[in-house]
Image (cartoon, grey):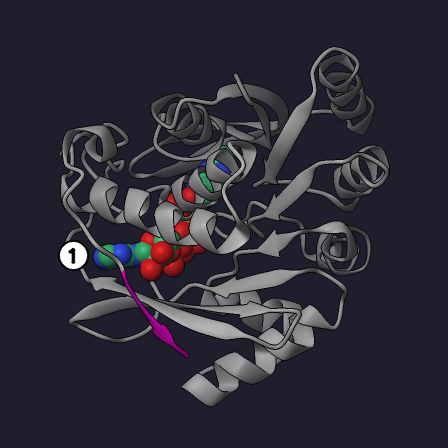
Amino acid sequence: MDVVMTIAGSDSGGGAGIQADLKTFQELKVFGTSVITALTAQNTLGVDGIFPTTPEFVTQQLSSVFNDFDVKALKTGMLFSADIIERVAGEIQNKEVQVVVDPVMIAKGGASLLQQEAVEALKTKLLPIATVLTPNIPEAEVITGMTIKTQSDIQAAAECILEKGLQCVVMKGGHLENDEFATDTVFLANGSSFKMQSKRIHTKHTHGTGCTFSAAITAFLGRGFSLQEAIVEGKKFVQLAIEHPLNLGHGHGPTNHFAYQTYQDYEVTVSEA
Ligand SMILES: Nc1ncnc2c1ncn2[C@@H]1O[C@H](COP(=O)(O)OP(=O)(O)OP(=O)(O)O)[C@@H](O)[C@H]1O
Ligand SMILES: Cc1ncc(COP(=O)(O)O)c(N)n1
């Protein structure tokens, strides 16, 4: 069985973070290991508290897993501080592992999951060793310092991000104003690009969509899919998870990680960007 890893924060409400990642890994038939960067006291209504792990203990968790398992692919989610980012980058930079970076910054409820001064470490330490980055539009704006409104802004921001040395950036369109479609645009370092379009679901149950998407990409990479196949199939996984909500909690509820196995009937439209 292929082994993958998530390096992220714990969501006590189970919809995002480590919990969403491990559920996704399980559904996609890879063996999930985890390195916890912070505990959050959280539910579908918001984040009530954050208790970060010490950077030393993040390193210890990474060593324990890497000393025993052949990790094929990993993802990072909530990393919280510059210290933790530096520890993570230091531990993974010489490993033969595909690295999916979900640059988690702000939770849906508005809580900050990444300290402001950590953005520089993300850009200079983690992006150069990433295989793929999956920013939403506000995250891409913070990383590039650009304002992103149009498709040409998306392209310019993606090109700026690719200059950091990673192989691929998936610009997620969940936050774009479009009533009909949720469109993500994928840019590769070799100059090619493509669009992935799915039906926009009108629901408030989108807690953890970004975590679930990046975990699904990681699982497919771990299983040996090509980068493009892993990204497109990851989009299908998150689409089905949003489309068949569980209706849990009183706020922004979790997505449905079981849906991919139950309903295999969705086709993501892939076209030229
Ligand atoms: N309402 C929706 N209907 C269908 N797909 C959606 C919807 N909202 C987001 N998506 C898709 O879900 C994936 C995650 O995108 P999103 O922009 O929500 O990430 P995110 O903001 O980083 O998520 P999170 O806030 O959970 O970290 C993308 O593929 C996006 O297109
Ligand atoms: C531990 C953790 N990691 C990531 C998110 C982002 O998810 P969302 O933006 O859906 O709140 C979160 N809320 N909590």
Asked if the beta carbon under badge 1 is closer than 8 A to the nearest atom of ligand 1, the reply is: yes
Q: Is residue 132 left or right of residue 236?
A: right
Is residue 110 visible in the rendered image? The answer is no
Q: Foreground residue, 222 or 120?
A: 222
- Residue 161 quadrant: bottom right
Category of crowding for the residue at label 1, using alpha-carbon neighbours closer than 10 angstroms: few (below 14), some (14–19), many (at least 20): some
Residue pictured at 49% horizontal, 28% vertical: 18
What's drawn in magenta, residue-wise? 269-273
Residue 227 vertical position relative to residue 250 in the rendered view, above or below: below
| Residue 266 x, y percent position in the rendering | 18, 49
Amino acid tagged 1: Ile
Residue underneath mark 1: 201
Main SS of the magenta segment? strand
Picture quarter with the C terminus: bottom left
Point out the quarter of the image occupied by ligand 2: top left
| Residue 131 x, y percent position in the rendering | 66, 52
Residue 189 vertical position relative to residue 134 in the rendered view, above or below: below
